[in-house]
Image (spheres, rainbow, N blue to C red):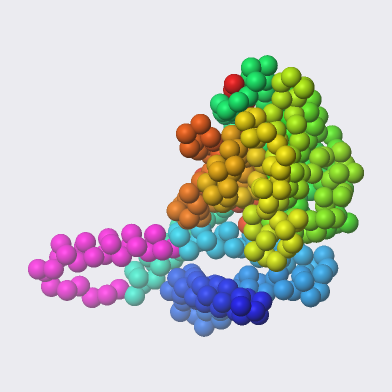
Amino acid sequence: MTPALRFALFFAPLALLVVSGHIYLYRRLFRDTAKHPAWRRVGVGVMALLAATLLGSRMLTHLWPSEATAAVAQLSWFWMGAATYLLLAVLSLGGVRRLSGWMKRRRAEQAAPAPVSEERREFLARATAGAALVATGGLASYGVWRAFHPPVVNEVAVRLPGLPRALDGFTLIQLSDIHVGPLIQRRFMDELVARTNALKGDLVCITGDLVDGSVEELGFAAGALRDLRSRHGTYFVTGNHEYYSGDEEWSDALTRMGLTVLRNRHVRIGEPGASFDLVGVDDWGARRSGYPRQRSYDLAAATAGRDPTRASVLLAHQPAGWREHALKAGMGLQLSGHTHGGQFFPFNLAVAAIWEHDAGLFHEGERSIYVSRGTGFWGPPLRVAAPPEIVKVTLLA
């Protein structure tokens, strides 16, 4: 399948969904609330502009990169989240309104039919639209606040097969899916580093999707990671967004910042008499995207030469390969991210339906996987029913 055909198959249903959603919003918010032609023309213009922004902003920033086009792109992300809640609110309130009307008609079906009041119909449409806007404003405001507010700290204890007694209680701090970019910048990163250091972990790991942009654009913001402090250092594996942003360039830059980048290899953590293997693999989807084997998921290469009876922790951005590869390779614990836990309602429900391991801790016999909801956000700056998190994992012998 050619790239052009793949794009067409993706864009066509997306465009249909976006256009139909904005037509529906126009009808409920503008056409039904007033008959004045000028008001309806305003509605057509507003909804057409917002739909066009959603569909074309990414292409616009690619063709004409500038501060102005970047601002348009950010507006489109904000609107995408708000439009989702506006649609849900209008549909829900409209459904309640129609159900109430049906119940009234059922109770009065023996009586003479009452004439339809256009004034009452318009009043109810305005009340529904107003309530939907208020509900959307409240929910979207909370989602933005939660997205930019410091992540929650989730602490979990995991028994790791083969872990030496001397390492019982060893702590790993997991950061994932930070998505440093136009909205997540140095201030956010400095606060994140301070909160991570306060947890006093033995080791810090970043499981991919750190950045959304080039080293030149985001090097200063990501440079806050130089200040991470732990007894055994900070380790990083690539996510799919590193490939969009320059995986090799970022691997070199992070190495210069003092992080250890694990690209299909493993290292020994601890003292010679008491240690475990920390294994890192590149992103699961890289090979399907045409990247060479040495720059895509290769657990066989990552574990080459290691004693399979030793305790092991695998860092892998996506949870997709856990059952197929990690369990078969004897990995005791896998730390992943990628799913964001759906990031905001109702997408958290969709992610839970699609991914077997969508967020949280899962076990298969003695083996475990923890999937982080992510520490930042991507796309709409919203977090509703899926708060960002820093994960503190305590290993038990």
Residue 292 x %, y %: 74, 62
101 is within the stretch colored magenta: yes
Q: Image point 72% across, 39% down: which residue?
A: 305
Work out whether residue 206 or residue 289 is closer to the camera in this orientation and state it: 289
Residue 342 x %, y %: 54, 51
Q: Residue furthest bottom?
A: 37
397 is within the stretch colored magenta: no
Q: Image point 43% across, 74% down: which residue?
A: 32
Is residue 10 visible from the viewing direction of this image? yes
Work out whether residue 77 or residue 362 is closer to the camera in this orientation and state it: 362
Q: Image point 52% across, 75% down: which residue?
A: 13
User: What is the magenta range?
Assistant: 90-117
Q: Image point 64% across, 64% down: which residue?
A: 288
The image quadrant that residue 95 belongs to is bottom left
Is residue 218 visible from the viewing direction of this image? no
Q: Main SS of the magenta segment?
A: helix
Residue 25 x %, y %: 49, 70
Q: Considering the image in quadrants, where does the C terminus appear?
A: top right
Work out whether residue 82 or residue 239 is closer to the camera in this orientation and state it: 239
Q: In the image, is 78 to the left or to the right of 344? A: right
Q: Is residue 363 above or below residue 167?
A: below
Q: In the image, is 122 to the left or to the right of 371? A: left
Q: Considering the image in quadrants, where does the N terminus appear?
A: bottom right
Q: Residue furthest top?
A: 166
Q: In the image, is 288 to the left or to the right of 351? A: right
Q: How many numbered discs, if any?
A: 0
